[in-house]
Image (cartoon, helix red, strand yellow):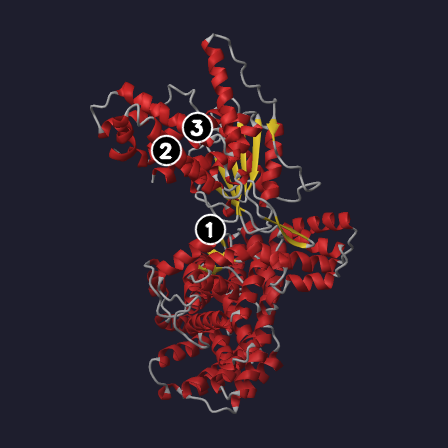
Amino acid sequence: MFVDLLARGVEAVVGAQLRRRDFDKRLRSSIDKAVLRYRSGYGLVDPTMVDLLLDQAPVLDLPTVAEALQEMVFFPARTHDGSKDAFTQAVTRFSPKTDEARLDRAVAELVRCLRDELQHLPELQPSFALMYQQQQLEALRAFEVPAASPPAPPAVSHNLPHRTYTRLVGRDDELATVLARMEPGDRTWVVVIDGIGGVGKTSLALEAAHQLVADQGFDAAVWVSAKRTMLTGHGISEREPELAVLRDLFEVTGSVLGRKELVQLPMREQRALVRTLLSGPTRVLLVLDNLETVDDEQILAFLRELPQPAKAIVTSRHRIDVAYSLRLRGLPDDQAVQLVAAEAGQRGVVLTDAETLSLTRKTGGVPLAIVWSLSLMGLGHSAESVLRRLGSGHSDIAAFCFAESLRTLEGTDALRVLAAVAMFEAPVDRSLLGRAAGLGEDVVARDDSIQLLTELSLINLQDGAFSLLPLTRTYATRLMQDRPELRDQVTNAWMAAMLAIATEYQLADPTWRDLSRLRTIGPHLQAAYRWARAHDQPHNALVLAGAVLADLDSNGRWDDLMAVCAEVEGYAQAVSARHLVVNVAWYQNWIHGQRGEFEAAWRALDRVDHLPMEPEERLRQLTLRAQTSRRERKFTDAASYLEAAKELVPKLSQPASSVLVAHMVFEQGKLARDLGDWDAAERAFRETGRVFDPEAATQALADGLTPAYDVEWTVRVLGNLGVVEHRRGNLSAASALLDRALSYTRAHGSVSNLATLLIRRADVELDLGHLDEADRTLAEARLLATRLRMRDEIAECERLTTKREGLAS
């Protein structure tokens, strides 16, 4: 035990880079010889003490005692430090009656024997040379000859690498943040710059360090890198890291600050000296690059207790819980284009605008990926081949950025979560991500996985949603292609999660549909719909279609909605999904009617009129015919269709009957409104309101509960009651009703309803004399109505503009 402890301590003095072959074997042999020599020699002088130290008391087996003995061997001049006292106290605890003078003589002989044997090892000769120099210095001090002080370091001493760029493109905000955190008055002592490999962490840290040394009062800067690989146009190359353990940081610090003797000091003395050097008055900046490759926890402990006024900048692919963290993402598009132009110019590479755009998108603005791509082009590769390689997931840049992180993820749930994020084309919330990864309601596994991916800089979190950089997405997608089992697990779980959401937004569903949530998850549903179509899953595509159409309608993307309607109609007819064919026709009728395209609106209804329908469907078909006729100003036809619809009411089944009757009565109210029969219109709208109760909806939303019916119908009731009050001249009541409807719509409604309500509100504001408010409201209404090509609303905007001009004059 004693030999093992002392051998490890001596090895620490030497350092791994200086050890020759069989050093450990030769070291242990020398220690054994020293102990034998001590036993046979000093055993004749004081056998009792030798027996006490080597045989009776296991003090030499204590790590603290072995360390103290090591310091006495290599630093004999330190008679007043704690090493000798620690040794003596340990022995006296085992043998309280030991004479300390006898003990001192016995220990001194043991030290001499060890020194005589160890000094013949070539690896230890520099340490003994330093020891003898220290002894001479102590001797000079004994004669009161003053020793020269260590030379003062230069005004600004540093070992910062040269900048590898002419100008740092972008990162202005991030650079300003780092510089501000390094100011003396800021309480931050460590800034950790994290992000995936190649995102520009080292360049940002280097630029900050150069500026801090030049402009912000740091007297010295220490740069130490743990980087093990480099990426060039020729591939990935290995490099020798400068930082592996805390001792490396200490030794580089001593070198930069002019304290060369620090290399030969034991660890405890190194730590004390470095803390003294960093404690002032010299302001020292430490920069630790690529810290994720270092396993020595002592480095993090040291950074957490960094003495003032020293500060540190750390770069790492892993998020580290030390002081202030700054996550780097890809450059914004405009800055990425600047970087492409600068790097292409240096290499004589000419790119078209389309190639530049493709390069910035495929790299996601990751600087190293851009530079690597242009390096390949400079070596003769075509832009087409480089761009194809970027999208393959098997390139050198992918291996450089992700291979090490992948090893960490193997065998964990986090690998499935990473693959699941890649299935989403837009940022995804935590709950949906967990279900898409197949973790169900296991929130612990989900959150642990997200934490690991965040620490590895593989996923980004913004506004409560998670996303991937394009390079990361490409790599994760390729990973699933290479691992069919992982692919099947993730795609099945992801599709199941999407289908579960889609069932909440089925076509013609009068129950509560959270449209505000749909705006968030809509892009996910659209991606799942496209994926199902591309992978020959028509059943899943049709299940998703209803929710996709609802999302496109809610967001006012009517052109996209019409395109999807055409796709879905073809799918539905192919698999005889009659219900879906009918509902698609109703969507088409609705949009064509809003746009004043009445021939197309009638064709949509006529295409399905021959299909067998349940009474509920037939009633809605007739109600839509009445609506189309009313919009054409064919009021008699509209009334006839509504009368035909009434005849179907006795045939309706519960619980749908009350809702469908309310739809029909609501259309009757609109017909009365357009005919100017305000009393009849009000009665119809209030009767509709008994089903789609505004007060019940208000209370449910206020209590955080789910309303019984879609709030869109509540909005329609309030908005039309507002029109009735306006036409009666009750401006205050009309204003209150329309404001309430607008409030609902902005939170829970569709864009088309918003356009209609804004026009009605602008009309009331004009009559109230609120001209500035009317101008703002009308401007917003015109923008939406024009985008959707809503014929009646556009005409109303023109009418109100003329009305506004008349009021101004």
Residue 120, image x, y percentages: 50, 31
Residue 17, image x, y percentages: 54, 40
**Residue 176 or 591: which is nearer the viewer?**
176
Please say if the residues under marks 3 and 2 sit with CB atoms less than 8 Å apart. no
- Residue at 36 percent across and 78 percent down: it is 658
Q: Is residue 255 left or right of residue 97?
A: right
Residue 174, image x, y percentages: 57, 42
The amino acid marked with disc number 3 is Arg
Query: Among all residues in the image, which is located at the extreme left?
Result: 97
Give the CA separation, mark 3 to mark 2. 11 Å
Give the number of the disc on residue 35. Answer: 2
Foreground tag (2 vs 1): 2
Query: Among all residues in the image, which is located at the extreme top?
Result: 144
Dot placed on the residue nearer the N-terminal end, 3 or 2 = 2
Which residue is under mark 1?
455
Compared to residue 676, the image places residue 609 above or below, namely below
Q: Which quarter of the picture shows residue 252?
A: top right
Foreground tag (3 vs 2): 2
Q: Which quarter of the picture shows residue 94?
A: top left
Q: Secondary structure at mark 2?
A: helix
Foreground tag (1 vs 3): 3
Which residue is under mark 3?
115
Please say if the residues under marks 2 and 1 sit with CB atoms less than 8 Å apart. no
Compared to residue 284, the image places residue 476 above or below, namely below
The amino acid marked with disc number 1 is Glu
Q: Residues within 10 Å of mark 1 (few under 14, many from 20)?
A: some
Dot placed on the residue nearer the N-terminal end, 1 or 3 = 3
Q: Residues within 10 Å of mark 3 (few under 14, many from 20)?
A: some
**Residue 486 or 671: which is nearer the viewer?**
486
**Residue 286 or 80: which is nearer the viewer?**
80
Residue 113, image x, y percentages: 40, 28
Q: Residues within 10 Å of mark 2 (few under 14, many from 20)?
A: some
